Image: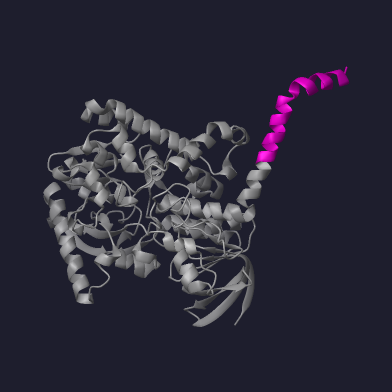
Amino acid sequence: MTNNKYDIVIIGSGLGGLTSGAYLAKQGKKVLVLESHNIVGGCATVYKRKNVKFEVGLHEMDMAKKSREMKHVIFSKLGLYDRINLVKLPQTWRIKTESTDLIIPEGYENVINTLEKEFPEEKAGIRKYFSGLSRMMYMIRRVPYDLKFWDYFFFPVTTLPMILYQLFKQKNTGEVLDSIIKSDKLKRILNINITYYHQNPYEFTWYYHACAQGAYYNSAYFVKGGSQNLSNALADIIKENGGEIKVSSEVKKINVKGNIAEGVTYFDKRAKQEVTVNADYIIANAAPQIVYDELLPKGYEDKRIKKLKNSVSLYTVYIIFKKKFSELYPNNAYSTFISTEKKLNTDFKEEAKGQRGIPVEDRNFVFVDYSAIDSGLVEEGDNRSFGVLTGPSFLDEWKDLSDEEYKARKKEMAEKLIDRAEQNYPGFRDNIEYYEVATPKTIKRYIKTPDGTAYGFVQDAYLKKSRCVRVSPTVKNLHFASAWNFPGGGFTGALLSGYFAARNILFPLKPYIVLRFLLCAAVGTAIGTAYQWIPALINLFK
């Protein structure tokens, strides 16, 4: 048994943990990151098959314009723009059925013009929809730590009413679309990528839909060489600033004295020994259910978590193509959502039933063709390419199968999906060199999340019950940074949660808001009484 003292110990090296660790290390804090696997990254990783990099989780990273994009703040402060190569995607996405082939470009006005051309009778609703996205993007443009002074000063007038409106109205995506759009097909097109967040638009909060879509329609990027490069860049920042990262190190418990977290005990798989380290703060880059049920002593449970629902998960069919897909289909989009004409034109209210009643292979799915950009996943000179078929799924569709049944079911699903892809891309099947399948069961085995979801809690409310609090209400000095916390799932959510956890440790949010409020009040008072003190000041110097 050895004892070491750190400022912060971070459990897990997903994007939330790495981002918080990188920011804290750059601020001079002594950081230790503990990762149970032999590489960092969580879902932001790659692995190799047949000398081709398989991107585990990143399809595309949404990116709003700089004035409304917190990732820009994070990337700039951490110097990530100099460490990774972001490849801009050529369009937002494509939607294909038997008779519909619609490419959604990037840029609000371009998207609006495309949709108005397809649905001229819905011009007013389309404009209203994008106006709503724009307002939401303005509302969430910065966390309080990064608002400039005058932005903060006028916040009660420019932004607070919008936040309160969303908080008390709690509108879901389905009801908003129903209120401004008549066409069921257009509603489905605007909601085509719900797979990334939810399974039911009538439960999915409008706030989250608008924030995500508002960024995607502006632009999106891929990390050249795969998301592992982003994880590695964050890990390098930690190490270059005196922090430590220990892989193959599985945390067994969080040590608590009274109600204060004092450190952790982990098992070093390489040295085959338990190690205890002490810390001023613990950041859990892990599902809060695991933290409370498995890592903390009994009696510290956060009962609110029991009331929350876990989000939808997904399957992925990873494919190596014999020839670059972009050469066979040079006009193909990077991301193509494949549906059916019947599905696109069905009453949108049918979506309230969710996805569970639909066979996995019959649900909408997305084909990501990484050869449509310079992805860096295939070596220079290799004419093969990589792609994935991905769609919504649930752990209970897989978990009770025997090993043989599981293998057979994965193959059956993959073959049916490939058949559907073949209908849209003749020659698709013949161009496949190799494929393998991941399911929610795979995700649960790898990152241990409840129900095998990568998206955290279901996004069914705004600033309320939809996600775990960022700071434990039962254990002092225990913070959370993952897809399970504010602002939610996905690469963007994980990055922001890590940054926010780090800032909150350096300067707790509530005192920070109070301090800035008092400063604004002082400035406001000075401005309001200027007609009195300015003449007096002038007279003083006469």
Is 264 left or right of 351, judged from the image as shown? right
Does the rendering let one see residue 35? no
Residue drawn at x 26%, y 31% is: 115
Q: Nearer the viewer, residue 410 or 402?
A: 402
Does the rendering let one see residue 369? yes
Measured along the vertical axis of the image, is residue 389 above or below residue 264?
A: above
Coloration mode: one colour
Measured along the vertical axis of the image, is residue 472 above or below residue 504?
A: below
Measured along the vertical axis of the image, is residue 382 above or below residue 211?
A: below
Counting from the top left corner in percent of width and height, residue 505 is at 61, 56
Counting from the top left corner in percent of width and height, residue 448 is at 39, 68
Residue drawn at x 24%, y 57% is: 356
Measured along the vertical axis of the image, is residue 376 above or below residue 477?
A: above
Question: Quadrant of the rendered structure where residue 408 is?
Answer: bottom left
Is 210 left or right of 325, judged from the image as shown? right
| The stretch drawn in magenta includes residue 519 | yes
The C terminus is located in which quarter?
top right
Is 212 left or right of 275, judged from the image as shown? left
State which region is magenta: 517-542
Counting from the top left corner in percent of width and height, residue 469 is at 51, 56
Question: Quadrant of the rendered structure where residue 287 is?
Answer: bottom left
Counting from the top left corner in percent of width and height, residue 416 is at 14, 58
